[in-house]
Image: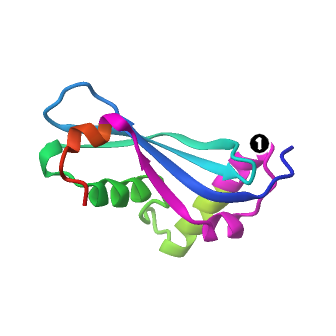
Amino acid sequence: MYMTAVTRLVTFVDVDDQAAGTVSVSARLEAELVDGTRVPLLNDRGWGSSQGWAATSVADLQETARTVVGPDEPFGGRSQEEMEAGHWASLQQIAQREGVVVDAATLRRLPHDVVLSRQVLARIGGNRL
């Protein structure tokens, strides 16, 4: 068990498809601990867009990455509040399975940074804003 506090959430975004024309990326959410250790929480997320890399910006990618790693939109009669509570509880369980003692409320309040890979930054070129 990690007895170190979680300091932030980080979503890493990388190119998922080598085709240069359309946007296809993967997103991996991790909890970063005080000592710099990172613990994976979600590694099965990503998205694509037909708009192309030239029309994509850092801000667009960061916003979409935060959306893609949750919480999900309500479905099946669930409210937004129920979806959010379930999302954070699920991340807490994953963290605990990885040996990190943290509660859902703490995870929810953490800063959430998005880090774009060098490949992603190269693809968007001058569209850094």
Q: Residue 110 at x, y = what percent?
A: 62, 66
Front one among 35 and 6: 35
Residue at the image position 19 percent from the left and 51 percent from the top = 56
Q: Is residue 26 left or right of residue 105?
A: left
Q: For the residue marked with disc 1, what is the amino acid? A: Arg
Q: Residue 70 at x, y = what percent?
A: 48, 57
Q: Colour mode? A: rainbow
Q: Which residues are magenta?
A: 91-119
Image quadrant holding the N terminus, namely top right
Other residues around mark 1 within 10 Å, as few (<14) / some (14–19) / many (≥20): few
Residue at the image position 44 percent from the left and 66 percent from the top = 74
Disc tally is 1
Q: Is residue 57 left or right of residue 35?
A: left
Front one among 93 and 121: 121
Question: Which residue carries the number 1 mark?
Answer: 97
Q: Quadrant of residue 106?
A: bottom right
Residue at the image position 25 percent from the left and 61 percent from the top = 129
Q: Is residue 51 visible?
A: no
Question: Is residue 11 on the magenta stretch?
Answer: no
Front one among 113 and 69: 113
Residue 79 against residue 97 in the figure, above or below: below
Question: Is residue 110 on the magenta stretch?
Answer: yes
Residue at the image position 70 percent from the left and 55 percent from the top = 92
Q: Is residue 72 visible?
A: yes
State the SS at label 1. Answer: helix
User: Residue pushed farthest top?
Assistant: 18
Residue 44 against residue 114 in the figure, above or below: above
Q: Quadrant of residue 15?
A: top left
Q: Residue 21 at x, y = what percent?
A: 13, 33
Q: Residue 20 at x, y = what percent?
A: 17, 30
